[in-house]
Image (cartoon, rainbow, N blue to C red):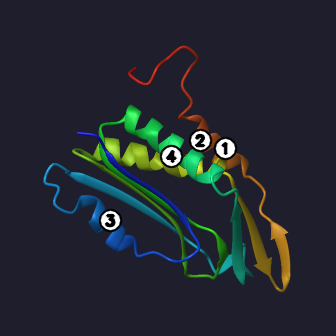
Amino acid sequence: MTAATTVRIQREGFDAAAEAARLTRGRTDIGALVTFTGICRGAEAGEPIEALTLEHYPGMAEAEIERHVAEAVARWPLMGVTVIHRYGRIAPGEDIMMVAAASSHREAAFSAAEFLMDYLKTRAPFWKQVEKAGATDWVEAKAADDSAAERWVRPAGRDAAE
């Protein structure tokens, strides 16, 4: 059976529990569902955050995320994947994004969810601006995030079946 996949980029909020239920509804073959929801924090390094503003390149962002979802489906025996990412102004406490991976067993679901999270954090075409005390700054990439994503890089000449 082909994995059911959903990729959405949207301005409005979403209900993570309803999305997870939608992914597994009526499926008795799914034995593991791993979900991750990123939430806007109210402070960074002790400094209050007023909001985040996320921008993306419409069309390209969806295509890039879909490409990585397809890679996850090729690498692990998944039965479903959902990726939702918001854009626009997001206040502290609001959901930013969600990844859900469903499989027969937990190892594949965990690995796929981590793979997709590392991709979204480091390579997805989103730009994040943080508002603090009335000032805005673009958020720079973090070396620790790049290092985490490196574990998923395959050596040259190896295909997805290996």
Question: Can you say whether 147 is above or below 42 in the image?
Answer: above
The extreme right residue here reads 135
Q: In the image, residue 82 lies at what x, y percent?
A: 40, 56
Counting residues from the start of the chain, the first of labels 1 and 3 encountered is 3
Q: CA distance from mark 2 to mark 4?
A: 17 Å
Q: Nearer the viewer, mark 4 or mark 1?
A: 4
* Residue type at the position of mark 2: Ala
Counting residues from the start of the chain, the first of labels 4 and 1 encountered is 4
- Which mark identifies residue 149? 2
Counting residues from the start of the chain, the first of labels 3 and 2 encountered is 3
Q: Which residue is mark 3?
A: 20
Q: In the image, residue 113 lies at what x, y percent?
A: 43, 50
* Residue type at the position of mark 4: Glu
Counting residues from the start of the chain, the first of labels 4 and 3 encountered is 3
Say which quadrant the N terminus sits in. top left
The extreme front residue here reads 59
Q: Are marks 2 and 1 in contact (CB under 8 Å)?
A: yes
Question: Can you say whether 130 is above or below 32 in the image?
Answer: below
- Which mark identifies residue 146? 1
Q: Nearer the viewer, mark 2 or mark 4?
A: 4
Q: Quadrant of residue 54?
A: bottom right
Q: CA distance from mark 4 to mark 1?
A: 20 Å
* Residue type at the position of mark 1: Asp
- Badge 3 marks a residue whose secondary structure is helix
